[in-house]
Amino acid sequence: MKERYTIRDVAALAGVSNATVSYVLSGKKKISEETRQRVLKVIEDTGFVPDMNARGLSGKDTRLIGIVIPQTEPGSKLMFHNTFYSQLLGSIEFATRRRGYHVLISATDMTQDYLNLIRERNLAGVIIVGTYESRFWAQLKELEVPVVLVDSYCKNDWFHAIRIDDEYGCFVETDYLIRKGHRRIAFASGSIKEDGVMQKRFLGYRRALEKNGIGYEEGLVFEDVVSYESGVRIAERIAQSELGITAVAATADILAIGLLSGFYRRGVSVPEDISVIGFDGLEETEYTTPGLTTVRQPISMKGELAVDLLIENIENPKMERMDKVLQVELVERGSVKQEAAIGSG
């Protein structure tokens, strides 16, 4: 005998659909007595114990929404070292609870195991943050579960999407440094992957250089993972280099905060010796010394809109696909100084 039976096992043994088993368990729909007794007999024989998420016919009945968040690096404590994710998750959880739903958070890759989890927990819908391998998207579509992608450049015609224009955001970031007189600008980034957020921001960095007649140098790109510790490491590498760097454009505030700390440890003054700009607009950037200049994105609004869009789709399965792009803004503080003169590129 199996250690644990699922609702699908019961349905197969009773010769009925998963929905019929759900109806028998919930009593929400009239089922013939013969069918009901057959299902109950299988439940008794197998020792099947339904959980709260198996009691609904559809995902709408479970009122449980799955949230997929990427790990920042293998073996790390998931995403909680970057308060971007804490803020995003907080807004998603609050908006979900306000609408009478609950969340199931998973820091994982979009794999077959997660597709199985969607089936087994009968999720009402899924919010997927970040970019993952595309080979499971078609299978996810077949589950007919509403999906909202956040910060994803997945090429699809099926799922709703909410993001900012990451390429433009990093263009604004880098162009601002150039307008402040900087021409030797380093780029501090997480892993630059095809069709990922970091790649889009990298393209924005390059576009700003090109627009201002500054040649791109591969040696000025410092690629690591998105974390405070990575920012410290990158600062140490820049401080030890002889590249003449006067400013650093970071692709995330958590990286930029690490840069501030790393430069301080090396006796490099910000902004007197080197300027630093971040990206995200985290609350912590107001309290660093100096205050961090950053490109702010509407993190909480992004989470709230993802929930609103997902629940609208749960309640209206035939709604058209939506693709929303939110605006960013530059927030000037004390971590960037005006260079005395623009040198040659």
Image (spheres, rainbow, N blue to C red):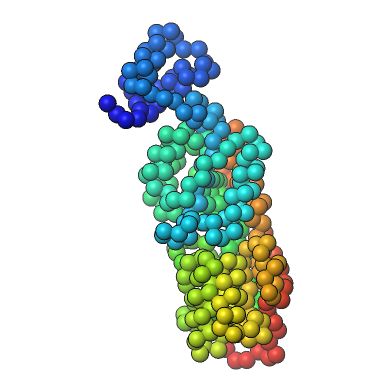
Residue 254 location in percent, x, y? 58, 66
Residue extending farthest top = 33
| Drawn side of residue 340 relative to residue 241, left or right | right
* Residue with the most extreme left position: 1
Residue 296 location, quadrant: bottom right
Q: Position of residue 181 (x, y in %)?
A: 67, 85
Q: Which residue is nearer to you in this view: 146 or 254?
A: 254
Point out the image quarter for the C terminus: bottom right
Is residue 164 positioned above or below 340 on the image? Answer: above
Q: Given the current orientation, which residue lies at the most extreme front position? A: 265
**The N terminus lies in quadrant:** top left
- Give left or right: position of 266 versus 47: right
Q: Nearer the viewer, residue 123 or 183?
A: 123
Q: Is residue 307 left or right of residue 109?
A: right
Q: Count up the numbered dots.
A: 0
Q: Is residue 260 above or below residue 317?
A: below
Tell me if I can see residue 143 in this picture: no
Identify the residue shown where x is 40% and y is 10%.
37
Identify the residue shown where x is 55% and y is 89%.
244
Residue at 47 percent of width and 72 percent of height: 223
Q: From this viewpoint, is residue 310 visible?
A: yes
* Residue 136, position as x, y percentages in the image: 40, 47
Residue 270 versus residue 106 in the image, above or below: below
Residue 93 in picture, x, y percent from top left? 61, 44
Residue pictured at 33% horizontal, 18% vertical? 45
Identify the image quadrant of residue 74. bottom left
Between 90 and 247, the residue placed more toward the observer is 90
When asked about the image quadrant of residue 97, the answer is top right
